[in-house]
Amino acid sequence: MKKALGDITVVDLTRVLSGPFSTMILADFGARVIHVELPGKGDDSRGFGPHNNGESGYFMSINRNKEGITLNMKAEQGKKILKQLIEKADVIVENFKPGTMEKLGFGYEDIVKYKPDIIYAACSGFGHTGPYSKRPAYDAIVQAMGGVMSITSAKEGGEPTRVGTSIGDITAGIFTAVGILTALHYKDTIGEGQKVDVAMLDCQVAILENALSRYFTTGTAPKPVGNRHPSVTPLEGFKCADGEYLIISIGNDKLWADFCNLVGRPELIVDPRFAKNADRTKNHKEIKPVCDEIMAERTSDEWSSLLEANAIPFTRINTVDKVANDPQVLAREMIVEITHPVAGKTKLAGVPVKLSKSPGQIVKAAPVLGADTESVLREIGYNAQEIKELADQGVI
């Protein structure tokens, strides 16, 4: 089957999370991704647990489908090899602090001199312009700076809380992949490459969605409201008779009427405090105890059966083990088992974008350190003796 990105070669100079996540997306759809790591040490994330037979589960989860080589980019011979790789590539991706690649002689302006159609993607904390450009950044830093933590907490008005997954890095990785694909399309139509500059902070601002609109409309900065939605009511967790919680999402007035009829409280439909979503949201403090009382009348199993049968959106709050074994998740192939040459059988999250004619696929595990160095170097003209000398010199 022809892969959607099967004709694209990517030189991947990224490490840890945001950059590798973006190149993983490209690799899942068939791009040839050559992941470059430091000789003897590798990507920093190889040191992150959990480990299986010495191989990092963290690293394996975001570097599947890639080839792996080692290269000292500071050595002159290493620079020569990197240039040779770039000359044969369509895309180069890096997530160093701005200025690092320029010092090595591989900034965008350096590369376009000999590879004018290159797509150069740079993912950094704050981007390549602006007063914060040279600052280092990590996930929690941009979650805090970008406002996401300020609207996240377990309870209304509670302590600012980091989102449990690394959305600072992951959203930047996704947007970087989008930027690369957009630039590839432009290149296909116009014939020109370009620089893709993605900042983690920018991406956090981009996903603030209604928090920004609320601020611009009211002039007041939104605060945490716990697990409820700030603009849709009721949409939050409710405790059932057995002590279990269900999340219920009443996204429009018709669903509200259906819910009220289902629970035997039709009078709530015409109650002026609750008739429209805006009314329910404004009067949240009054509607919450009413819904609490209703939900406490039955167990979570009883409510699950009733709500599902009547098409009311709801869910239990699944732990990760339940997610990993959920029949819908499994049916959509979102848990995939592959065999790693060292770690053995390993399960990973699958490919979330389903294409009908050129689907993404996990075809191989993440490479062990330097697994493809020799084959890649042979491909660009190095013989066995030269490769041995490069290894002896610490270049690879």
Image: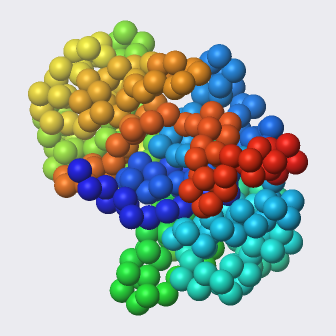
Q: Tell me, yes or no, if residue 46 can be seen here.
A: yes
Q: Which residue lies most toward the bottom here?
A: 190
Query: Within the image, what quadrant is residue 372 found in?
Result: top right
What number of labels is visible? 0
Residue 236 appears at what percent x and percent y? 41, 37
Looking at the image, which residue is at 81% across and 62% down? 77
Q: Nearer the viewer, residue 247 or 217?
A: 247
Q: Nearer the viewer, residue 170 or 237?
A: 170
Q: Nearer the viewer, residue 251 or 338?
A: 338
For residue 183, above or below residue 64? below
Looking at the image, which residue is at 45% across and 36% down? 364
Q: Nearer the viewer, residue 73 or 298?
A: 73
For residue 75, above or below residue 232? below
Query: Within the image, what quadrant is residue 99 found in?
Result: bottom right
In the image, 63: left or right of 232?
Answer: right
In the image, 219: left or right of 351?
Answer: right
Residue 310 appears at what percent x and percent y? 12, 32
Residue 67 appears at what percent x and percent y? 55, 46
Query: Within the image, what quadrant is residue 246 found in?
Result: top left
Looking at the image, which residue is at 14% across and 40% down? 258
Q: Which residue lies most toward the top here?
A: 242
For residue 207, above or below residue 365? below
Looking at the image, which residue is at 77% across and 44% down? 388
Residue 103 appears at what percent x and percent y? 86, 72
For residue 87, above or below residue 233? below
In the image, 362: left or right of 383?
Answer: left
The colour scheme used to paint the residues is rainbow
Q: Tell me, yes or no, if residue 124 can be seen here.
A: no
